[in-house]
Image (spheres, rainbow, N blue to C red):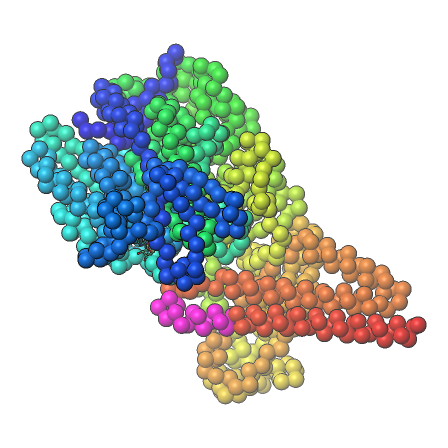
Amino acid sequence: MSPCNSTQHCVVLSEGADHSVCPCPVPILACCTMRAKVSDMHSKDCVKVAVRVRPFNKRERDAGSRCIISMVSSSITIQDPRDSQNRRSFCFDYAYWSHSGFTRDHRGVYVPEEPGGRYADQVSVFQDLGEGILENALQGYNATLLAYGQTGSGKSYSMMGYGPNKGLIPKLCDRLFQAIRENQENRQCQVFFSMLEIYNEQVVDLLSRASRTPGGLRVREEQQRGFYVEGLRTVPCETAAQVEQLMEQGTRTRTTAATHMNANSSRSHMLIILQLKQIFSKESITKQSNINLVDLAGSERQRSSGSEADRLKEGTAINLSLTTLGNVISSLADVAVGKKVVHIPYRDSALTKLLQSALGGNSRTVMIATLSPADICYEESLSTLRYAERYKKHCKVFWIFPFCSISNIFNINFILLYSPLCRSTPHFLSLHLFHFFRAKREWDIGLCDSSPRSICIKGLGIQERHAVFRNEQRRVTLTPMAGTKVIVNGNPVSQTTELQHLDRLILGSNCTYLFIGYPSERCGDDWSRYDYDYFQSELAAAEGIHLGESSAGLSQTEPSLLAVFYDYIKLMPMVAEANQMSQELSKGVEFKLEIKNLALSDSKGHDLEKDIVVRVTSKGTKQVWMWSKAKFINRKFLMEEVYQQHLAEQSGDNVYKDPFWDPIEPLLLGTAHLWLQSLAFRIPLEEQLEVLGSEGTEEGILQTQLVPCSSTGLPLGEDDILIDPSEILGRRLDFQLVLDQCCGLRWIREARNRGVQIGQPLYTPAVWHNVNPLLDHRVHFASLHTSQRLLDYLQSSAVVLELWGLQGEDEHFFTVFCGEAARSRSVRPSCDAEFARALKVFYHNMTSVRGQLQRLRRHRPSESDLLGLRLFVDEQSRLLRDFSEQLEQSVSTLKQDVAAIVRRKRERSGIWS
Ligand code: ADP
Ligand code: MG
């Protein structure tokens, strides 16, 4: 029997019986033996944290940097360069001094200056960290090695090494194949190698160019395997040289994003998976183990976009995987010290999914945290040491728990077991735990755990007594308690409902279960398809979001659509949780997922990509914000922090502004396409345009005209109509675009205190409180020399008119300010009124500037732009130029207006005095 490295557990609830746990789907006797083995492994310290400090690099030497790190045995002290009294010490399993005391030997290998010197070279690091991992893997246990640190601190040097200074990974491979050769008589071994990169949450197979599909490879989940990367290339290897060659190939393929510090892949995570299969034919045993080797992205990303206050700054690239890794480790550390933890966010990023079992305890894990010695890197190094300390803390306590407690404490996806122990009773297959229903009885399910007849579950939105299950006369029914959230097969239920075999249940915002009926109802069905995605897809379908089933299956679905669909179902449970938190914290905001069709802004009206956005609505004031996916995910972490603080009843040292809210801003409600073709024939056009929202909803009607005219603005007559548009080539073309009126504005109908404005490419004055506001706005356009390009454009394109929703404060400000001004004007003509008008003009201008900025923000390179990056850069600079011109213009208009007003005021006071 092979040692068990499964994460699967089963909890059986039966009268008077305790929870009994069985760690793998094999007969129970074998499991007991396994448990002894597993605990053997745990009795050794399964988590090691090492810290290594590198030599100064050239930049640091040139800057005359001071070394602020000192090490004595395994303790490390870091000194604040601005305050010599401020020192912090940390203690880890290993502290490697690789800063000084070394020389280069004839092969170019860095070695200690003198034998036994304190310099820690690659060999000694391998002996401490690599040997243990290897030994563990040969015994059949999983092992994980992570390198964490700021870019340029020595992660890749320690993991891969450079040139003759081979790092942990190649050394480990050398020793692995050596061990295989030495043990050839009693076992047959197979090694499989895979190498992948996680960049911007996309998983890229580094060994297969073909797999560079848009959106990357999919991380899937199966009951038996846990998370894995679908379609990842796995290469069988027989020698270390072969592995090294593959590593070189993979490293070459790796996305390289240059930063000012280091031109290597500082923004992506590299993960190597070595699978070792050992077959002991004499004993009929197969041992299988995975070694995960992870070179993490530079940790400075984590700080600037993750844990600090400036996480909220827009536009910062969020390294979701690194942020989530930090959050997972934090949550586990909190659990370890006995804090209440609602949710461990493994599922929130690709990296934490793939490392779930390693982080959750099913693996021997080593973290090497690398540091720069220099004073200029003080903040980064301190943050790295704190991170490493957190890591050590979570892991240390983790292993103290006996196996059976772990499944109760952590919401790890422990699923089940088929054993003669539990075949005959109906039960729930949970993505957390397994609950069995014995005999005729009634069960309460909820937060309570006092009653022996209760099933205790924890999760957002779970009430003390959430629902009651009854098992009578071979019928199992579910009765939700008043006001609780219960969803069966995607539909909310509030009445007693009889459960059928394979019904899907969601309790609260995100506790998911599969109901397994009596054996007579089970006809060899494949339960594995009911994975987490299945539950979420079903919920999405209930909301009307689904992929059309084609006979050719999902592979026929357009990749960008698939990506949006998976994004949607990934965000759904997060949105549910955000709503639950908002409710429990009485924040009064509601989150809703929307699919935004980017075609709305395309001047050719092409059906372009779709994107996911989160609509945030304040229930009281009806103010609305639109958050991008990344922004929402980032905010959700912060909401969780606020929520945790609330649970722990701490006053909160939250330095961020409230993550549930934002300052009010104009909102793009929808767009209308005004096709220009009639201008090519100089035919006037009067149109009632539908303004369509991002989900295809009608936001209102826009009455418009296109009027071909003379250079002085006189409308042309019928005699001027052209039969052949090419006649206009080389001649002057004048026309006016008229925006007459908006009708039936949904935005205003919903809340009367709102306003609208047409933005892009022209900006009308804002109009407030009116469902059918008159705009009466006219803009004259002239082309002095009509080119073929312009003609083609007129014939094939539309002007995209954007309808912007205005809300709250702006309007309030105007009403008060202008009201005051108007009142004073009635007494005598006042400069204040002029001042108010000037300000109003300025604010309108700023709305247009904001529109321009929004456009800039949305301006992303398309696939074809990427090929010719120049085009994109040119367009970007043009937009920037336009933007800055508009900004300059608005500010200078304001200055002039204010100067004129002040001048007039002086003149007047001179006259009056
Ligand atoms: P990272 O992967 O963290 O961005 P690197 O491993 O690429 O950083 O290291 C940056 C530079 O520092 C490289 O030139 C590397 O050779 C050097 N370096 C890192 N660690 C050591 C060390 N322990 N001894 C000597 N040089 C090192
Ligand atoms: Mg590196």
From the top left corner, tell me how far across and down residue 421 is, in percent.
28, 18
> Residue drawn at (40%, 72%), measured in percent from left and top?
870
Would you place residue 187 above or below residue 40 in this image?
below
* Magenta stretch holds residue 867: yes
Ligand 1 location (quadrant): bottom left
From the top left corner, tell me how far across and down residue 688 is, in percent.
59, 65
The range drawn in magenta is 864-879
Q: Horizontal placement of 535 versus 798: left or right?
A: left
Q: Horizontal placement of 1 versus 373: left or right?
A: left
Closer to the camera, 651 or 517?
Answer: 651
Q: Horizontal placement of 811 versus 169: left or right?
A: right
Residue 31 shows in the view: no
From the top left corner, tell me how far across and down residue 459 is, in percent.
47, 31
Closer to the camera, 195 or 377?
Answer: 377
From the top left corner, tell me how far across and down residue 263 is, in percent.
35, 61
Residue lying at the far right in this picture: please name it. 913
